[in-house]
Image: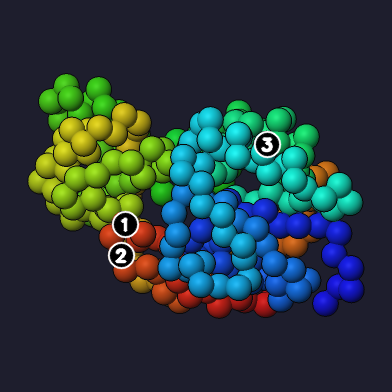
Amino acid sequence: MSEQVDFQPVLLGTDFNCYGMARSFYEAYGIKSIAFGVTKLASTRYTKLVDVRIVPGFNENPGFVETLAAFAKTMDPNKKYLLLSCGDGYTDLISEHLDELKQWFVVPYVGADLFERLGNKEGFYEAAEEFGLPYPKTKLISREMVESGEPIDLPFDFPVALKASDSIAWLDVHFEGRKKAFILDTRAEFDALLPKIYAAGYQGNMICQDFIPGDDSNMRVVNAYVDSDHNVRMICLGHPLLEDPEPSAVGNYMVILPEKK
C-alpha cells in the first residue's frame, strides 16, 4: 500500500458498482471512499470501506450540483478529490455540469455532446458505422412509427433483440413484463410489445437487431482506462461466465474471468 495518499475517491451511487470501486481503492491504497446517493442499498449498507452519505434528490438537478458544491467547501486543500460515477444517470449529470465540477474535482469524463453521442445507443451505432466497426444488423424504431399503426418492415428474420436507445430514460419506464432488453421469437410478440412500451411513457427510439444466438460463454468484454491526454494506459479483456438472470438487469455481467494474452 502507498504510505501517503494525496487523493480522495468520491463515488456517485450506492449499489454494487460503488462497493466494487471502493473495495478496489481500499485494497490498492488503504483508503476509505466517500459515496453520495439517494438511498441505502444492500451492497454498501454495512461496509466499512465507504462513507455513504444519503441525500434525497441527489440524482437530479439542482440537488446534484448543490450537494457537491457544499461538499467542496469542506474538502482538504492538500488533497485531490477524484469524482467517479457508478451509474449511467450520474455520468449524464457529470457530463452536463463538467466545467463547474472541474473547479473542485478531478473529473475523468467527457462533456455532454460526446456523452450524448456515445451514451445513446443510436449515436453509438452511428459512430461504429463511421469507423467501420462491425455490429448486428439494426433497425431504428421511433414512437411515430409505432403510433402510425403501419407494419414495421424488418431487414432480418426473427428472433430479434429489442432494447431502448436511451438507457437512462428507460430506467423510469415501468409496465408489466418490462425488461432491460427483449429477445422476441415471433412477429406477434414484436407487434404486441412496442405499443406497450410507448403507452408506458417512453419517448425515445427503440433499437431492433438481428439476434446473434449463443450462450454467455461466447461473450467477451473489453474495458479501457484512458488518461486525461487521451492515451490508453491499460486495457483488459474479460470472458463473461454469467449474466444477471433478472429481467431488469439482463446483459449485466455477474462473473467475468480475465483473459491474459
Tell me the element at label 3. Answer: helix
For label 2, the SS is loop
Residue in the image at 48% along x and 36% along y: 60
Quarter holding residue 174: top left
**Mark toward the start of the polypeptide (3 vs 1):** 3
Work out whether 157 lies above or below 112: below
Q: Position of residue 214 (x, y in %)?
A: 35, 68
Q: Residue 36: where, in percent of width, then height?
A: 57, 51
Instruction: Identify which amino acid the numbered label 2 is placed on.
Output: Glu
Q: What's the mark number on residue 69?
A: 3
Q: Residue at 68% across / 44% down in the picture? A: 71
**Disc 2 marks which residue?**
246
Q: Quadrant of the N terminus?
A: bottom right
Mark 1 element type: helix
- The amino acid type found where label 3 is placed reads Ala
Tell me the amino acid under the disc marked 1.
Ser
Mark 3 or 1, closer to the camera: 3
131 left or right of 39 in image: right
Q: Earlier in the sequence, mark 2 or mark 3?
A: 3
Residue at the disc numbered 1: 248
